[in-house]
Amino acid sequence: PAMATALQEAAARLRAAGHTVREVRLPAWAAEAFEAQATVQGWEAVRALHTELTQHADALSPLLRDYLREASRTIGDADYDAAQRVAAA
């Protein structure tokens, strides 16, 4: 929601400055690619920040800590492998 709001505000400012702004529809494959990116990012973040999460969780921001915990519970190796195949395609 925050990104959508920021994008709408940016478009409004560009229009106000005299620029032409138009909406475009992404191809169908883009949704799958965005989902795959989120999976890859979550899986890799959990592994990159494993020590911080397990030994210093209280030093992490609540947003990051919750994100890492959720990703560690919901994204498995098979999910990551499937997302990598989507990215390669």
Image (cartoon, helix red, strand yellow):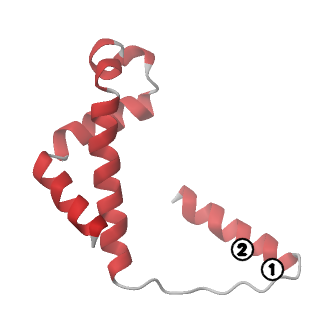
Look at 80% across and 70% down and name the residue there.
Answer: 13
Query: Considering only vertical position in the picture, is 11 above or below 4?
Result: below
Q: Secondary structure at mark 1?
A: helix
Quarter of the image for residue 81 reads: bottom left
The x, y position of residue 47, in whole percent, is 27, 33
Mark 2 to mark 1 CA distance (whole Å) = 6 Å
Q: Residues within 10 Å of mark 1 (few under 14, many from 20)?
A: few
On screen, residue 30 above or below 88: below
Q: Residue 79, image x and y in percent? A: 16, 54
Q: Nearer the viewer, residue 50 or 20?
A: 50
Image-based side of 50 in relation to 1, left or right: left
The residue sitting at 14% across, 46% down in the picture is 76
Q: Residue at x 86, y 77 (%)?
A: 16
Residue 52 in percent (x, y) is at 35, 19
Q: Are marks 2 and 1 in contact (CB under 8 Å)?
A: yes
Quickly name the residue at label 2: 11
On screen, residue 41 above or below 82? above
Q: Is residue 87 left or right of residue 75?
A: right
Q: What residue does disc 1 label?
A: 15
Q: SS for tag 2?
A: helix
Kind of residue at badge 2 = Ala
